[in-house]
Image: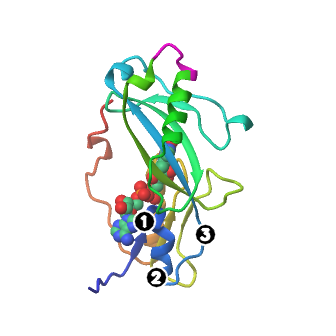
Amino acid sequence: MVIKSTFVVNAAGIEVDRIAEMVGARNFSIVPLKGTLTDFDEEVGRLISHEVHVLPRIEDMPHVKAVLPNIYGLARSGIYLELTYRSDRVVREEAVNHNIKVAKELFPEIPFERHVVRSFIGFMAYTNADTGWHDFVVDIPDYVPNWVNIVLGPAGVSASPMLGKKVVELLMQSGLRLEPKKGFDPRARKGVQS
Ligand SMILES: Cc1cc2nc3c(=O)[nH]c(=O)nc-3n(C[C@H](O)[C@H](O)[C@H](O)COP(=O)(O)OP(=O)(O)OC[C@H]3O[C@@H](n4cnc5c(N)ncnc54)[C@H](O)[C@@H]3O)c2cc1C
């Protein structure tokens, strides 16, 4: 199948480098970092109203220590982090135990181990394993015009409204003609109810 397009926005997450490679537009490298999170049921969710996040300490590295409520009324803990192959999507017992331990350290009186609903993994794309967290790539490679690569490390969700604006700017600089919709009110959109 052949799909023709004048502009391409490559925002393929952890596959972003493979997609860029297909057209010779890979002007970055990524390191896949796997994170495992664990969710606890509503009974625990009702007890946790705010995020508790331990500042990074050498003895906890590379893991994050945090417990937070999520928008579904559950509580969540983690993050067990590991450098591994991106095909490695297994939820490891060691990771789940780590997340339960973190939760119990922060809230010793809650029997988290009896309230586990699920654990899951996700990948973050580090562009620089040394600097870690906040190096993003949002640009058009010099030698492949009309192609935008978007590589978001952790905090990519929080940064996404600004990044969206940046992508629009890049596309317009490349010649895409866009007209603001008259009367568009972004505040009219329904937000996530918590
Ligand atoms: C453990 C963990 C903790 C995180 N914590 C935070 C946080 O605290 N704050 C925050 O803001 N963000 C956080 N993030 C988000 C994260 O770090 C990323 O920044 C964000 O998810 C990247 O968004 P993205 O749109 O680039 O990629 P993704 O959300 O991965 O989206 C990529 C999309 O491309 C699709 N795709 C891939 N390949 C193809 C293909 N060949 N064809 C068609 N479609 C394809 C995928 O299916 C997917 O829908 C966390 C992520 C993880 C894993």
Q: Residue furthest right?
A: 58
Tell me the CA gap for discs 2 and 3.
14 Å
How many dots with numbers? 3
Can you say whether 35 is above or below 64 in the image? Answer: below
Residue 119 falls left or right of residue 28: left
Tell which quarter ligand 1 is in. bottom left
**Relative depth, front residue between 147 and 131:** 131
* Percent position of residue 64, x then y: 59, 38
The residue that mark 1 highlights is 12
Q: Which of marks 2 and 1 is nearer the N terminus?
A: 1
Residue 55 falls left or right of residue 91: right
Q: How crowded is mark 2: few (under 14 residues within 10 Å), some or many (20 or more)?
A: few
Tell me the CA gap for discs 1 and 3.
14 Å
The residue that mark 2 highlights is 22
Residue 7 occupies quadrant: bottom left
Residue range (magenta): 105-110
Q: Residue 29 carries which label?
A: 3
Tell me the CA gap for discs 2 and 1.
13 Å
